[in-house]
Amino acid sequence: MGIIKMLFLLSVLILVHEAGHFLAAKFFKMKVSKFGFGLPIGPTLWEKQVGDVQVLVHAFLLGGYVAFPDDDKENPLPADSPDRFLNRPIYQRLIVVSAGVIANVLCAIFFVYLVAGLWGQLPSGKYETIVHKIVAEQGESVWNSGMQVGDKIIKINGTETPLPSGVNIFATLSKKFDGKVDETYVNQNYEKLKKLNIAYNEDEIIPADVTIKLPEVGTESPVTLSRDELMGLSKIKDKQVELNETQKELRESVYDKSYYISNGKVSLNDIAYALSDNVRPVNITVERNGELIDLKTIYPNKDGLIGIERNWNEIMIPTKDFKSIIKGSNEYLFNNTYMLLYGLKQIFTGKVPINDLHGVILITKIGGEKIANEGIFSGILLAALISLDLAIVNFLPIPALDGGHVMFLIIEKIRGKKLDEETIDKIGTAGFMFLIALMIFVIFNDIYALITNKF
């Protein structure tokens, strides 16, 4: 049921966008030949003539369009007819082309204000992560850390954790024997090892049954992550190197030992790598009774677990009266618009990999679950964010998008004359094909994410 509601909300956003174009055109008394829900790919499910406008519903529902007489090359209208879109003043065409984006922005504002008024609260995007239970086996480091049930987790390794998943990310990246090491740390351990075993060179295979003295080594460096990396707005950079199979097999034989008896297959270099893949510290700061407390270091196990169960709550913004509705709604819209723009910038700069791009299939699944678990208001707010995102993406200067049409109009205004229609058509077709290819790629990403249970 939640998925059906989410599909309905997404359909509303598409209709709102196309209605923006349509109503703006009608305001200037422009002739509109078609109003399409879905893209003209595959069969048409339904069509009807309403006045002088042909209304169509296509099987490929991921989109919509408003068509003008100019879009039909066989249209009998004279080239200088005022009913042709291209013969209208630039300012009118600019408003009509931009109206879909404006409609999506207004729709987002309406949805947020509606939820703020009816629900009486709005999500802040900030969470409290609270320790519910310590479930680690006796002897694990978490028991000696000073952590208590009810502690609110504030920072991990010096970085504030904006999402509850931050604990999992740090613990997973800090797990014992993860098979990766920092080369600087390896070099330090090799120098210690060499001083104790001067008879052997770096890559020389040590004969079987020879006893090698092992130095005292510390732990690997703590994982450091930025807020963007924790929020998924930047790819987590891993500069470590992988151990080979020989070195991985050697790890437990040298871990926390003073001596190692050679099996005749390893070198000092192998031992240095094996020594360097041990444990990473996780340093947690909690809030307890209003006071910030730095716990003793915790070391995750081989599975990347520190052994706690957590509860988390999103901090809500109260919107109980007119003033708080206005303030809370504006704050919510501003913060989320900033995050959408920032996320787009991260994608274009390559800091978020293109494989992380997802579309309508995954959005529908996530939205459906959100509605089922958190109620319709959460679904409406998600639809508001999608509406904002549609507005932002549609205004990019890419041919076949609204922003591409705006770009052509600005060029026409600067040149003082119309652009060649054939050139525009070719560029527009190329842009459309690019968008179709991108859509197919995103759909593949969605399906792959669902199959592999990434979401």
Image (cartoon, rainbow, N blue to C red):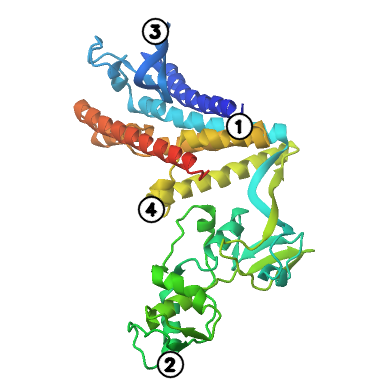
**Amino acid under disc 3:** Asp
- Local packing at callout 1 (Cα closer than 10 Å; few below 14, some 14-19, many 20+) is many
The first of marks 4 and 2 along the sequence is 2
Q: Residue at x 39, y 10 (%)?
A: 54
User: Where's residue 108, x and y in %?
Assistant: 56, 33
Q: Which residue is mark 3?
A: 52
The first of marks 3 and 2 along the sequence is 3
**Amino acid under disc 1:** Phe
Q: How far is mark 2 from mark 1, CA to CA?
A: 69 Å
Q: Which residue is mark 4?
A: 350
Q: Nearer the viewer, mark 4 or mark 2?
A: 2
The first of marks 1 and 4 along the sequence is 1
Q: Mark 2 near mark 1, Cβ–Cβ under 8 Å?
A: no
Q: How far is mark 3 from mark 4, CA to CA?
A: 47 Å
Q: Which residue is mark 2?
A: 195
Q: Nearer the viewer, mark 3 or mark 2?
A: 2
For this rendering, which residue is in front, 108 or 447?
A: 447
Left or right, residue 84 beside residue 289: left
SS type, badge 4? loop
Q: How far is mark 3 from mark 1, CA to CA?
A: 32 Å
User: Where's residue 306, x and y in %?
Assistant: 63, 63
